[in-house]
Amino acid sequence: MSIRPVLEKRPASPTREGAGVHLHRAFGFQDPSELDPFLLFDDFRNEDPAHYANGFPWHPHRGIETITYVLSGEVTHADSLGNEGTLGAGDIQWMTAGAGIMHQEMPKGNAQGQMHGFQLWANLPSSLKMTAPRYQDVDSKEIPEITDDDGTRVRVITGEFWGKRGPVDGIAADPQYLDVFVPAGVKKTLPIDTYRRAFAYVFEGSGAFADASQPTGVLLEKEVMGEEVNIRDMSGNRTLIRFGTGDEITVQAGERGIRFLLISGAPLQEPVAWHGPIVMNTREEILKAMSDLRNGSFIKPAH
């Protein structure tokens, strides 16, 4: 077994999207090969309705899949194909935009005004860029949750983990998407397929990820369980951890425990042409998509 080295640790950057929604972006609109097949990851967490209530009005997507995971509050959605619904706390929507779709997403806070969720964009291979759009709306109770003997909890959204398989299927990147909580003071090793690109996104608590290049160990801000641990550095709230190759990661939870998303997928290794929410392989395909938007042929008839 080999520990994946930590290639990079960086905080998510505050930005605005849609009609002025305040969010934090862990990555996106940068080097698309960095976390291929994933293109963008946003954390939309806020307690002020004025910072999210205007939402994400009608906008197009083509050539990608968007994955929305709600932790608190709700997101109502509608699209140009007549689909509509509401995602509540713990729910997932996996939308394959394919050949093209227009949709909107409107967040609403819980009773305390709190809204928290994530959106991940996954690329589609050239062979599926123009596939028919598809939705998978998954209720929270359909997502398996596993609790290990040491109190570690894992929700399996897609892919297989510890003998459980997530309810989202048929995804081009064959990803693994896990919501992981490791209790205070616990050191946990989690397997990842060697051939996948992988990242963690820490959004609660603190801890540290072991690094194969640090054999002597570095102390946490406080020693955990009185021991030294092999770590690269601390990982705090809204932090992206990008891993190198290997078949496992090891995390040491801090004094409040640590909760993070662990996401991996098989790289497509294809050229990327990108224009906002439209991601194709060539500039010519982008120009065709923009022409389709202008002349009303962006939405393709179902076959």
Image (cartoon, helix red, strand yellow):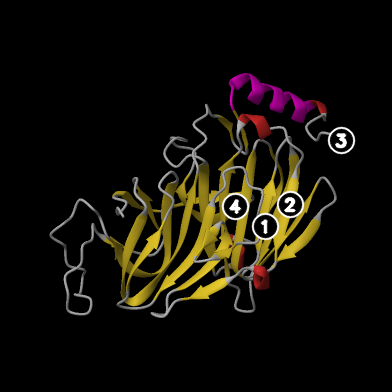
Which residue is pictured at 53% across the width and 66% down the height?
Answer: 163
Disc with the residue nearer the chain's start (3 vs 2)? 2
Q: Amino acid at mark 2?
A: Tyr
Q: Earlier in the sequence, mark 3 or mark 4?
A: 4
Q: State the CA–CA distance, disc 2 to disc 4.
A: 26 Å
From the top left corner, tell me how far across and down residue 169 is, in percent.
Answer: 66, 53
Quadrant location of residue 70? bottom right
Kindly identify the amino acid type of the residue bearing the numbered disc 1. Answer: Gln
Specify the quadrant of the image occupied by residue 75: bottom right
Question: Closest to the observer: 243 or 114?
Answer: 243
- Label drawn at residue 135: 2
User: Which x, y percent locates residue 294?
Assistant: 77, 27
How many angstroms separate mark 3 from mark 4 (CA)? 37 Å
- Disc 2: CA contacts within 10 A as few (<14), some (14-19) or many (>=20): few
Which residue is identified by label 1? 93
Q: CA distance from mark 3 to mark 2?
A: 17 Å
Tell me whether circle 3 and circle 4 mark residues in contact (CB < 8 Å): no
Q: Mark 2 or 4, which is nearer the eye?
A: 2
Task: Identify the residue under disc 4.
Answer: 20
Q: Name which of mark 2 and mark 4 comes first in the sequence.
A: 4
Q: Which residues are magenta?
A: 281-294
Q: Nearer the viewer, mark 3 or mark 4?
A: 3
Residue 225 placement (x, y as % from top left): 22, 79
Q: Please say whether residue 291 is one of the residues in the magenta stretch.
A: yes
The circle drawn on residue 303 is: 3
